[in-house]
Image (spheres, rainbow, N blue to C red):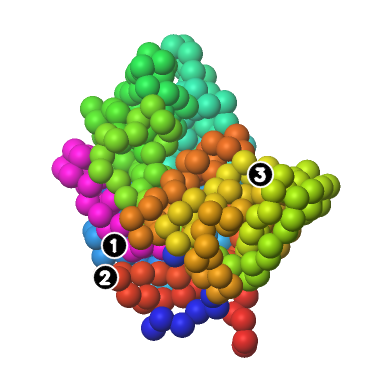
Amino acid sequence: MDEFLRRTWVQVDLDAIRHNYEEIRRAVNPAAGMMAVVKADGYGHGAVYVARELADCGADWFAVSNIEEAVELRRAGLPQPVLILGYTPPQLAGELARHRISQTVFSTSYGEALSKGAVEAGVAVNIHIKIDTGMSRLGFFCQQEDCAASIDEAAQVCTLPGLVPEGIFTHFAVSDEGEEGEAFTQHQFEQFCRAVDALREKGIRFRYRHCCNSAGVLCYPQMNLDLVRPGIILYGLAPSGKCKDVLSLRPAMELKSVISMVKEIGPAATVSYGRTYAAQEPMRVATVPVGYADGYPRLASSKTRALVAGKPAKVVGRVCMDQLMLDVTGIPQAREGMTVTMFGRDGEAFLPIEELSDAVGTIPYETVCLIGKRVPRVYVKNGKVIGVADYLKAGD
């Protein structure tokens, strides 16, 4: 299978996904299970193809953001336990149980509502208690040493009918900040352990304790506990520049397009909306059919590069909704139909996604997640295309 619409596409290297999983698995405590985070459509890579590869690698759990993502995995035939990290409407308790999906519980009111939904549906829902040790996001508030009231609330939730306490977890806020984050990460871990111990004293025990996100996996192996939750590192990207090169990771995603037209323009000719770029001398400009509707940010205008024939070509003028322009004056072989690499590898040349992310003031997490649904995902394994996820199904 090697046919797909060659306008603009994402190429996902499943061998890189496998390599990254195996690197992480070797670094993690052998007693800890792997909860692979595939939320946000597998960080833009395509949750189903990625999850199938990770399941074949031996992933113990999957984590997602919402019930739609969880059900997608079930419909794809994946039997592994799945945890929803975010909110699910309590009236969907029956669906959670039917699909064998575990749900995060983060407050007394939510726990009571979910319990009511479970009782009305005649089901039992597995839950993971979320402890807020430093994010001030979801969770029972335990950022200070005295959190007895929150522990009492969490304990009460664990006794509600229709709810089966299965796990307990927290989320690190600055584990990716290097030395600057060490003290607070240690504080978070200690607060979490205090909460677990306090609940144990009340007779509540959990099969699964987990707190390590990607940066936690890389930098805090002593905090692995029963499960770890690798996310961005599964896709070959570092959580931040302060914890790069801890493992030998391989980026799995490349964004590709093609040259739709090459033209020569003279001095003083302007490029794109707003006439923000003017040619200073004769130059060759290539138009490429990728724009901010595809997820290539408008903020990248005249700031970033692409690869054409293995050589860098600067983005000139404003990025349009569906197109952008490149200066290919120094690439005489540039021609219509030639592949353009917006980030990723072109032969021996490599353009890291971090260059694009840095140029627009964001992080690779956001860059991969923003690649639009009109961009097909093309899956490669052992050097061959083995599948295509075309969300628009062109030609049907």
Residue 26 in the magenta stretch? The answer is yes
Q: What element carries label 2?
A: loop
Q: Name the residue under label 3.
A: 302
Q: Earlier in the sequence, mark 1 or mark 2?
A: 1
Q: Mark 1 points at which residue?
A: 15
Which residues are drawn in magenta? 12-33
Q: Which residue is drawn at 37% across and 75% down?
A: 385
Q: From the top left corner, tell me how far across and down residue 368 is, in percent.
A: 52, 51
Quadrant into which the C terminus falls: bottom right
Q: Name the residue under label 2.
A: 382
Pick whichever, 91 or 261, lies toward us. 261
Q: Earlier in the sequence, mark 2 or mark 3?
A: 3
Q: Which residue is drawn at 30% across and 71% down?
A: 383
Identified by mark 3, the residue type is Ser
Q: Distance between the residues labelled 2 and 3?
A: 36 Å
On screen, residue 71 versus residue 246, left or right, reads right
Quadrant into which the N terminus falls: bottom left
Q: Which tag is nearer the camera, tag 2 or tag 3?
A: 3
Q: Is mark 3 on a helix, strand or loop?
A: loop
Classify mark 2: residues with Cα within 10 Å, few (<14), some (14-19) or many (20+).
Answer: few
- Furthest-right residue in this view: 274
Magenta-colored segment: predominant secondary structure: helix
Q: From the top left corner, tell me how far across and down residue 86 is, in percent.
A: 54, 45
Classify mark 3: residues with Cα within 10 Å, few (<14), some (14-19) or many (20+).
Answer: some
